[in-house]
């Protein structure tokens, strides 16, 4: 094993990243730039400009030989560095080997049902994930991929051979809305929706319900519900403004989507055959 990947965070026990209790691995780096991203510090890799070193109150950051290093023991998790960074990055990222990640998984192993890889966008670390999942499967645990759909699973299905399923974000089906919302055309995401369903690897489709976006919400929910039927779960996520970049709030909204408004779309999805639609 020789693969390394930048890891933003590992949550040893999570009950919101797939079925049961799971260890969730969040890789750094994403190919989308979603207006509503709650963790915009995971989008880019650090360019070692050094700006955040000056604002760290705990002396946890150092600039050495043109590279910023992070001392996790000194860090007090105040997030001043994340607020300082204008590059959509974080200095609190570890370059980890597959063995490093496995060591953390093994500590949680007796208590978990499986492992979920997320991001950022985890399929940007496909080779790493393939090695990791092969080892996790030997330990008898399930493996899930949480993806924005930017990776062509049909063209390169190697990851599907070592994972139990994919949780796929379908954020928009309208081309103009998709480009505005996530900076990406929807075509590949929608092809992935069909392919993963046919391959029996679509664990869950997910759509964010935005406040006062009746046309866009309905178009996306209709499309997904008609495609998936009862073939997988359909999670409708209420938009929440927490963590969203301040500059994007005027376009995205400053309030959480109303629960009853979101339920309306769950009912629509179920009426179209997506019997496993639910709101969170
Ligand atoms: S969160 Fe960032 S700024 Fe705060 S102590 Fe840790 S490294 Fe320093
Ligand atoms: S995390 Fe951001 S501010 Fe800190 S060194 Fe990297 S790019 Fe610069």
Image (cartoon, rainbow, N blue to C red):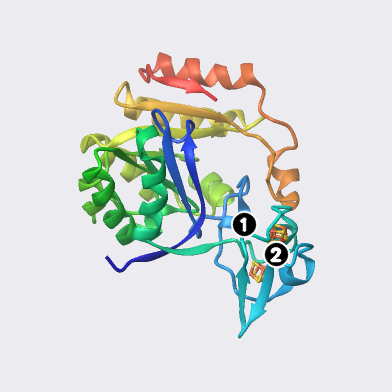
| Residue position marked by numbered label 1 in the rendering | 41
Q: Position of residue 64 (x, y in %)?
A: 63, 81
Q: Residue furthest bottom?
A: 65
In the image, 101 versus 3, the foreground residue is: 101
Q: Is residue 85 left or right of residue 195?
A: right
Q: Image quadrant of ligand 1?
A: bottom right
Q: Position of residue 272 (x, y in %)?
A: 39, 18
Q: Is residue 198 left or right of residue 113?
A: left
Q: Is residue 83 left or right of residue 150?
A: right
Q: Position of residue 15 (x, y in %)?
A: 47, 31
Residue at left 56%, top 17%?
263
SS assignment at label 2: loop
| Residue position marked by numbered label 2 in the rendering | 85
Residue at left 68%, top 46%?
244
Relative vertical location of residue 4 with respect to residue 132 in this rendering, above or below:
below
Q: Residues within 10 Å of mark 1 (few under 14, many from 20)?
A: many
Q: Position of residue 61 (x, y in %)?
A: 68, 69
Q: Are marks 1 and 2 in contact (CB under 8 Å)?
A: yes
SS assignment at label 1: helix
CB of residue at label 2: within 8 Å of ligand 2?
yes
Q: CA distance from mark 1 to mark 2?
A: 8 Å
């Amino acid at each position: 094993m020789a693969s390394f990947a930048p890891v933003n965070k590992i949550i040893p026990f999570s009950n919101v990243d797939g079925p049961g209790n799971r260890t969730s691995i969040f890789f750094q780096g994403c190919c989308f730039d979603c207006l509503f991203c709650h963790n915009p510090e995971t989008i880019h890799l650090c360019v070692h400009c050094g700006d955040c070193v000056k604002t760290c109150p705990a002396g946890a950051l150092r600039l050495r030989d043109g590279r910023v290093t992070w001392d996790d023991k000194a860090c007090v998790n105040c997030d001043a560095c994340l607020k300082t960074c204008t590059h959509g990055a974080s200095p609190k990222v570890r370059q980890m080997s597959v063995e490093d990640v496995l060591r953390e998984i093994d500590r949680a192993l007796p208590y978990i049902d499986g492992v979920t890889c997320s991001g950022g966008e985890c399929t940007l670390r496909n080779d790493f994930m393939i090695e990791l999942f092969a080892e996790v499967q030997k330990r008898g645990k399930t493996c899930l991929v949480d993806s924005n759909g930017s990776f062509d699973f049909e063209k390169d299905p190697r990851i599907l051979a070592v994972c139990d399923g994919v949780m796929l974000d379908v954020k928009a089906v309208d081309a103009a809305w998709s480009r505005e919302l996530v900076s990406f055309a929807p075509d590949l995401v929608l092809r992935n929706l069909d392919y993963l369903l046919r391959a029996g690897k679509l664990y869950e489709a997910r759509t964010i319900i935005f406040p006062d976006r009746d046309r866009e919400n309905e178009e996306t929910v209709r499309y997904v519900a008609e495609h998936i039927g009862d073939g997988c779960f359909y999670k409708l996520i209420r938009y929440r403004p927490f963590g969203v970049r301040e500059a994007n709030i005027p376009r995205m909204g400053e309030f959480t989507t109303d629960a009853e408004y979101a339920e309306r779309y769950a009912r629509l999805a179920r009426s179209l055959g997506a019997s496993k639609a639910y709101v969170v």
